[in-house]
Image (cartoon, grey):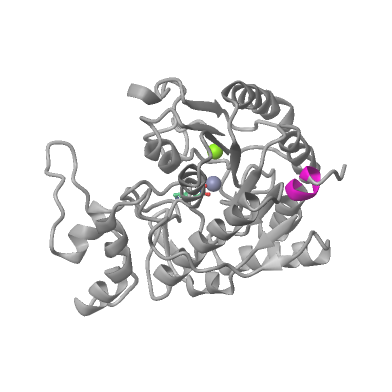
Amino acid sequence: MKTVFSPLHSRRHVQTELDGGLLIAPHEKPSRAETILARVKDQALGEILEPEEFGLGPITRVHTPDYVAFLETCWRDWQAEGKPGEAIPAVWAGRGMRHRVPKDIDGRLGYYSFAAETSISDGTWEAARASANVALTAQKLVAQGERAAFALCRPPGHHAHADLFGGYCFFNNAAVVAQAFRDQGYGKVAILDVDFHHGNGTQAIFYNRADVLTISLHGDPDLVFPHFLGFEDELGEGPGEGYNLNIVYPPGTPYSTWSQGLETACRRIEAFKPDALVVALGVDTFEGDPISFFKLTSADYLTLGNRLQQLGLPTVFTMEGGYDVDAIGVNAVNVMQGFDGKS
Ligand code: OKS
Ligand code: MG
Ligand code: ZN
């Protein structure tokens, strides 16, 4: 399988993540992508390509132009106000308040986000753009006939809504890829999110559409991030009713349980008969992950990859979460190798 990777991911190098009342060193750090790339090379998974430049067109198919413009100037605007640290949202429109875009940068940071752990500094815009280009290049490879491609995206994307950042995500790479398939004439696309966290942004972007099926397996949002979306009674709305599926699990879930939901998801995808599949791949389901509570083992990722291959679909993998950096390369590449037939 071919991998798409951009060294520009390292332009996202924030120093802070608000966690437990402290500004800690971020979990979502450059070594994540470098470790996966090293494993891709070590295992000779396949050719490694740099992304092409697709411009903002495919991004604004799923994100609003005002949100994209905000991200482009956010750090500049923050600095222009003389703020001493990294840009962190700290105020939101609560119940009963008005959802309008303020002029002030503190107000706009709140308007365009849903959480405060995701700081912004210089280079975040460039890295997020590169990450979307990585995803779109993988999509192009598959549209040109590759059975599958690995978009080694960083920063990740699945939490980003049409006009909200958060959960370390800015552009929803999986959604951008799915929409690109649609715009190229693929009639139906399925997105399967196997990251530990609910793919809230992906769900929201396609919630009222029947042409893109969204499925996410994740930790119970009653207990974990993103807290306010991802419950099993969220089935889609309007024309999209029946085209969103959430499968939630409690702490300690091993592959033997998790894979039952995977089977449900695979059967739903088979019934949908999509023309392409996007897998939002997080490996924060790993037993050693520092911020998650599932118990998947490294060997389980080979099994997962093999099961996804059996769907028989043109497939783009977009990299999402995974924070046990020592294991992230083995785990992510195991999915690709399982897909390619290794057991
Ligand atoms: C807040 C925890 C924030 C978790 C962000 C989740 C990132 C992720 N202390 N999403 O898939 O991995
Ligand atoms: Mg998920
Ligand atoms: Zn995650």
Residue 125 makes an appearance in the image: yes
Magenta region: which residues?
Answer: 335-339
Locate residue 46 relative to residue 158 in the image: left or right: right
- Which residue does the image show at 59% across and 32% down from the upper left? 251
- Image quarter where the N terminus lies is bottom right
Q: Give the total number of marks visible in the rendering.
A: 0
> Can you give x and y, in whole percent of width and height, for residue 268 in the image?
59, 22
Residue 99 magenta: no
**Magenta span main SS:** helix
- Which residue does the image show at 74% across and 41% down from the upper left? 305
- Which residue does the image show at 31% across and 50% down from the upper left? 163
Residue most extreme to the front: 185
Look at the picture and state if 328 lies above or below 207: below
Locate residue 258 relative to residue 242 in the image: left or right: right
> Can you give x and y, in whole percent of width and height, for residue 252 in the image?
64, 32
Look at the picture and state if 10 lies above or below 27: below
- Image quarter where the C terminus lies is top right
Locate residue 107 relative to residue 261 in the image: left or right: left
Q: Quadrant of residue 327?
A: bottom right
- Which residue does the image show at 23% across and 52% down from the upper left? 111
> Can you give x and y, in whole percent of width and height, for residue 192 in the image?
57, 36
Residue 237 makes an appearance in the image: no
Question: Which is nearer the eye, 202 or 271?
Answer: 271
Look at the picture and state if 26 lies above or below 187: below
Question: Which is nearer the eye, 312 or 125?
Answer: 312
> Can you give x and y, in whole percent of width and height, for residue 106 in the image?
20, 62
